[in-house]
Amino acid sequence: MTRPRSGRGISVPAPRRAGTAIAAAAVALILAAPSTGTAAEALRANGGCRDGVPNGAFELTLPDGRLRVSGAFARGKRSGAFIFWSPSGARLAVVPYDDDAKSGTVAAWHPPAAAGAAPVRRLEAPYAGNLPHGTRRTWHANGNPRTEVRYERGTPVEARAWAEAGAPLPAEEARALAERDLAGDDAFLAALEALVDGERPRCDRVRAGPL
């Protein structure tokens, strides 16, 4: 079932701390129109319903057919990998879910510096039950390592960080940078989820399918 949506506002959380310009730029890119850079006027949502809730494959496309989001719901909850692209076609993020909770390795890329430019890794972060769990890594836009933080069920245990040129940072600065990055990444991922939530299938208008 495909239908256009026009102008419905999407509430996008702002990064909670200063120093999250990368996340803010990525959030703006998610919501930008392909040529003007202004808020997109319409997306086409393609998804199904079952028993009154979203179920099965889900896509968001631009009116010309270009993919913005691809994923799936299982009985109303996000399930498996959701993939997000910019209006120009650059991959922005891959977010895996299990029963609506982030579970597995979240990956994100810096917004491309120019059309056709090779993507640069920004984030690789393992999650379990919606909490950071394992070694979370981020990279500067030039490809150099930025932070490496080990988490245990959402609690940071050990942190290392590097300046853009590659020099290691003192422990206190590393912890502060890791904190800022986590806040920015939380805002970025929340914006992705808000985009999907704002466009999910309207199952209250669809007759429930067979069991």
Image (cartoon, rainbow, N blue to C red):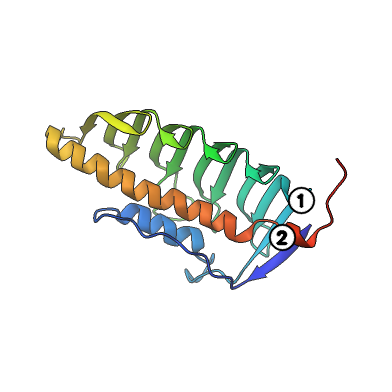
Marker disc for residue 48? 1
At horizontal 33% and vertical 53% (from top left) the residue drawn is 22
Where residue 44 sits: x, y (%)?
Answer: 68, 62
Where residue 152 sits: x, y (%)?
Answer: 34, 27
Q: Residue 138 versus residue 154: which sits nearer the camera?
A: 154
Where residue 208 sits: x, y (%)?
Answer: 83, 51
Question: Considering the image in quadrants, where does the C terminus appear?
Answer: top right
Which residue extends farthest right? 210
Question: Considering the image in quadrants, where does the N terminus appear?
Answer: bottom right
Q: Earlier in the sequence, mark 2 or mark 1?
A: 1
Q: Which is more foreground, mark 2 or mark 1?
A: 2
At horizontal 20% and vertical 37% (from top left) the residue drawn is 175
Q: Is residue 121 left or right of residue 104?
A: left
Whether residue 60 can be seen here: yes
Q: Amino acid at mark 1?
A: Gly
Q: Amino acid at mark 2?
A: Arg
Q: What secondary structure is found at the residue carrying circle 2?
A: loop
In whole angstroms, how far apart are the C-alphas of marks 2 and 1? Answer: 9 Å
Looking at the image, residue 128 lies above or below residue 5: above
Q: Residue 161 versus residue 116: which sits nearer the camera?
A: 161
Q: What secondary structure is found at the residue carrying circle 1?
A: strand
At horizontal 76% and vertical 52% (from top left) the residue drawn is 52
Looking at the image, residue 176 lies above or below residue 68: above
Where residue 123 sits: x, y (%)?
Answer: 39, 39
Looking at the image, residue 40 lies above or below residue 153: below
Total marks placed = 2
Q: Residue 52 versus residue 20: which sits nearer the camera?
A: 52
Whether residue 86 can be seen here: no
Number of other residues with Cα within 10 Å of mark 1, as a class: few under 14, some 14 to 19, many 20 or more: many
Number of other residues with Cα within 10 Å of mark 2, as a class: few under 14, some 14 to 19, many 20 or more: some
**Residue receiving disc 2:** 202
